[in-house]
Each structure stands twice: as C-alpha cells, then as structure tokens.
C-alpha cells in the first residue's frame, strides 16, 4: 500500500511538473506622440531660366515646387509666400527693387494642387513677401505631397544692357 | 513558478523506532549495542521549470519627430530573464492592444507603427523593420532550447538580458494635429 502511495505520488508530481513546464508573462506600455501643425517645401526647379519669345516680349519661365502641409483643425492657417531676396545682378539690367523704368515689373501667377493659389498677377518685391498659396484650418496635403508652380513674367525693357542677370526668389511655407 | 523542491524522506518508520530505542538505552547508560552511526537517507528531487520574467523601460514612451514630416520615434529597452528546457524555446512578442486614439491620427491597423530590434544581449532579435499589429503577435526576440540567463557558460553573460526596441510612426500630412496614445503589450513565454 505504501509503495502504491509512492507510485501515485510520483505520478501526481509528474503531472504537476508537466503542467508547469511553460511560463508566460506580459506587460503593457503606452506610446504617445503629439502631432503639430507643420509644413515643408521643396523647390523642384532650382534654376529657372527666363526667356523671351520675341523682340521685347516679356521674359517668362516657370518655377515648380512641392510641399506638405498640415494646419490645426481649430483656427489653423497656412501660406506659401515668396520674396526676392537677392535682386538681379549685375547692375544695368532688370531690377525688382529699383527698376530702371517705372512700370518694369517682375510678376507671377500661381497654381497649387492643395490650398488656394494666388489669384491673377502678383508683383514680386524685394521689400515684402507676396502670396503664392493660402491654406485654411484643417488643411492636409496628400501623403505623397502637393505641388504648385509660379509662372514668371519680367518686363523686357530696351534700356536693359545686354548680358546675363541673376536674382534669387525665396519661398516660405508656414502653418499654424 | 521558478522551480519546485520536493523533499522526500525515506527513513523508514522501523528505523526511526530503532533509533528511539537506542537513544533510550544510551540515556540509561547501557552499553551501546547501538553505537552505530545512524543515517537517514533522503532524496532531494528538484524540478526546474521553464521560466520567464519581463520588464521594460521606460514604462511609457513619448515618440518625437526630428523635423517637419519626419517620422516620430523613440526607444525602449525590454529586460528579461529566461530559462527554457533543452527541447523548449522562448520568445518575446509585441501586440498593439489599444489602437491610437483619437482616430484622426496614426493607425497601427494601417501599418503606421513599426519598430526595429537592436542590441540584443542574448537570443535572436527581430530583424529589419517590423510592422506592429493589433491582431497578431509580432516578434521581438527568440530564444532556443536550453537558454538561461546569467553566468555565461551557455547562459547569457548578462542578467537581465536586454533588447532595444526603436518605434517609429510615419508623420503623414493627413493626420490631424493633436495628441495620440496607443497601448502595446509585450508577452514573454518559455517552454
């Protein structure tokens, strides 16, 4: 009988041992992030050559850009603006800040796949930023990004000396 | 349960009774016929079961972005102790047990949360970028049979073992601004 008890006990212990031959434990953690209003822009046409189609016809050309934007759902806004941060050089040719002739202008028109592009013809300035695209609250560009263009037109004034001239336009995008 | 020690005395009742007599005789000054060394046999049986212990730091993780539309990322370290049987195995896995909320931002169910495992001190860490899931366990680390923690000589050299988990959430422009939170659960098993 005692032997039988020992055998039974062994069997019982064997069962228990087999039962505990695995272990498992878990734990949880939280992942948090805060997503702000933000925006980014890339100029896809690094150098835009303005050309004239005929004698004294305006110099024209197009600058492309891509952008991403997210504005706040409540009261958010956004914009893309441009400013001529370096006027045409060398001197003797066109100038945005001090045109040789009154009425000489660097103007542009805009397109944008997201937001509201500037309307009509805008005049570029060295003194102030001028509008390209505006965004309202809760604006979101597509995941692949949005795109737009600025089509330039520069007066072809006969008083310009012949030669090559360069200016720099800076695009700024913002979001709140 | 880490292990179980079973002490099984096999000193028979008969032997114990004889010892009692001997003690009585000795106390009475009788010549010790019983001047023998009495031994009590004892079998020590121990069952060491597979075991797993898991901890991770920090307990709550804030993911940060390095710039506009750069992915949000952050790292945590999973610390563990493990013992597997020679024919067993072990694992640490992850599951998203509570989806990001509110629902206007990233979604694990859309594949927005991924992670990489690096610097595993023991075992085999997950390779490449793993997309976290709310419906299935995804791997963090795997352990072979006869794995054990600490002491070297086949066991790990460190105690606890550790593996770094770097989380990443894509910063999509389609997400609405705001704060978002999800819960992940790490599970560890050993057989």
Image (cartoon, coloured by chain):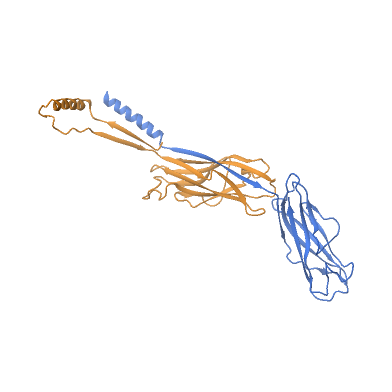
Chain colours: A blue, B orange
Quarter of the image for residue A75 reads: top right
Which of B126/B8 is in front?
A: B8
Q: Position of residue A48 (x, y in %)?
A: 77, 66
Q: Is residue B119 above or below residue A126?
A: above
Tell me if I can see residue A131 in this picture. Answer: yes
Quarter of the image for residue A117 reads: bottom right
Q: Position of residue A23 (x, y in %)?
A: 44, 38
Q: Which residue occupies 73% across, 47% down?
A: A72
Q: Is residue A125 left or right of residue A71?
A: right
Q: Is residue B19 above or below residue B162?
A: above
Q: Is residue B93 above or below residue B28?
A: below
Q: Which residue occupies 22% across, 25% down?
A: B13
Quadrant where the N terminus of chain A is found in the figure = top left
Q: Is residue A89 left or right of residue A10?
A: right
Which of B130/B181 is in front?
A: B181
* Residue lying at the far top of the rendered structure: A1
Tell me if I can see residue B191 in this picture. Answer: no
Q: Position of residue A76 (x, y in %)?
A: 75, 47
Q: Which residue occupies 60% across, 41% down?
A: B182
Q: Is residue B151 left or right of residue B75?
A: left
Q: Position of residue B115 (x, y in %)?
A: 56, 49
């Amino acid at each position: 009988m005692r032997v039988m008890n020992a055998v039974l006990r062994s069997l019982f212990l064997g069962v228990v041992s087999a039962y505990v031959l695995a272990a498992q434990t878990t734990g949880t953690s939280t992942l948090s992030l805060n997503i702000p209003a933000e925006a980014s822009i890339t100029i896809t046409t690094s150098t835009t050559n303005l050309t004239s189609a005929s004698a004294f016809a305006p110099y024209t050309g197009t600058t492309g850009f891509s952008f991403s934007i997210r504005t706040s759902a409540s009261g958010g806004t956004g914009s893309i603006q441009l400013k001529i941060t370096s006027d045409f050089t060398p001197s003797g040719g066109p100038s945005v800040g001090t045109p040789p002739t009154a009425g000489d202008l660097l103007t542009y028109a805009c397109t944008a796949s997201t937001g509201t592009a500037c309307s009509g013809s805008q005049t570029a300035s060295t003194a102030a930023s001028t509008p390209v695209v505006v965004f309202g609250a809760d604006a979101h560009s597509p995941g692949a990004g949005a795109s737009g263009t600025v089509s330039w037109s520069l007066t072809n004034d006969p008083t310009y000396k012949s030669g090559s001239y360069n200016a720099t336009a800076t695009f700024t995008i913002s979001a709140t | 349960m880490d292990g179980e020690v079973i002490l099984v005395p096999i000193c028979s009742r008969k032997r114990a009774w004889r010892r009692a007599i001997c003690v009585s005789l000795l106390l009475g000054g009788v010549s010790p016929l019983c001047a023998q060394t009495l031994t009590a046999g004892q079998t020590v049986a121990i069952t060491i079961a597979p075991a797993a212990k898991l901890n991770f730091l920090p307990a709550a993780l804030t993911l940060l972005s390095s710039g506009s539309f750069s992915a949000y990322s952050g790292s945590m370290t999973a610390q563990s102790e493990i013992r597997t049987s020679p024919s067993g195995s072990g694992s640490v896995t992850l599951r998203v047990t509570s989806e990001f909320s509110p629902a206007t931002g990233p979604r694990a169910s859309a594949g927005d949360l991924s992670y990489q495992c690096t610097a595993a001190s023991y075992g085999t860490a997950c390779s490449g970028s793993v997309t976290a899931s709310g419906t299935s366990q995804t791997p963090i680390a795997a352990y072979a049979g006869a794995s054990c923690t600490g002491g070297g000589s086949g066991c790990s050299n460190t105690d606890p073992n550790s593996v770094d988990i770097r989380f990443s959430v894509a910063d999509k422009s389609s997400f609405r601004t705001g704060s978002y939170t999800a819960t992940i659960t790490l599970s560890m098993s050993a057989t």
